[in-house]
Amino acid sequence: MLEFLNRLLKLSPIDLQLYASKSLNAYCAAKSIQHVTVDELIAHLNSRPEGRDLAEWERRGALLPLNGRGDDMPQELRQSIPSQDIDDFCHIVDSAVEVGIVDVYGTASELPAMFLEKITSILRKNNIDIPQL
């Protein structure tokens, strides 16, 4: 577990975001969660730019119907997810988004890796294979 965290800490911010997206996708695939809003969020997370375009990328993400920022998820999506999976799904979505935005306006920290650790612990709890780094 510590080795995994150390490997995460060596990844670039974009690679951390891509890994978070990959992990969200793995959870959704394993739980058969399919919805256009999930696809839109994953596509957005995969498009994280470098440099000055980050503010615009963050703004676009906040406008998504499923945005991982504390807003209610679309009702149609909520109804398609078994009730026992809602909390884990919400935690993974929120954490995947936080990986990309927590350090956008400051210096790099260990927080993205900590959010990824939270995601991978949920995957493990649900017996879902952890994506390769």
Image: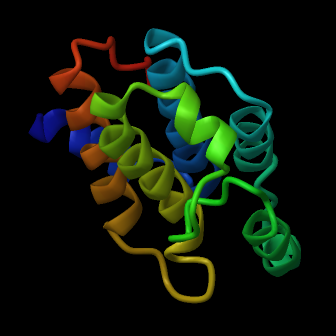
Name the foreground residue: 72 vs 127: 72
Q: Residue at x 88, y 76 (%)?
A: 56
Q: Residue at x 26, y 47 (%)?
A: 118
Name the foreground residue: 86 vs 30: 86
Q: Residue at x 52, y 47 (%)?
A: 16
In this rendering, the answer to whether 87 lies above or below 23 is below
In this rendering, the answer to whether 96 lies above or below 84 is below
In this rendering, the answer to whether 6 lies above or below 114 is above
Question: x and y percent of residue 34 in the render?
Answer: 66, 21
Q: Which quadrant, please, contains the C terminus? A: top left
Q: Which quadrant, please, contains the N terminus? A: top left
116 relative position to 69: left or right: left
Among the 4 quarters of the image, the one containing residue 80: top right
Name the foreground residue: 24 vs 113: 24
Q: Residue at x 11, y 40 (%)?
A: 2
In this rendering, the answer to whether 86 lies above or below 98 is above
Among the 4 quarters of the image, the one containing residue 27: top left
88 relative position to 61: left or right: left
> Residue lying furthest bottom in this view?
106
Question: x and y percent of residue 82 in the render?
Answer: 40, 25
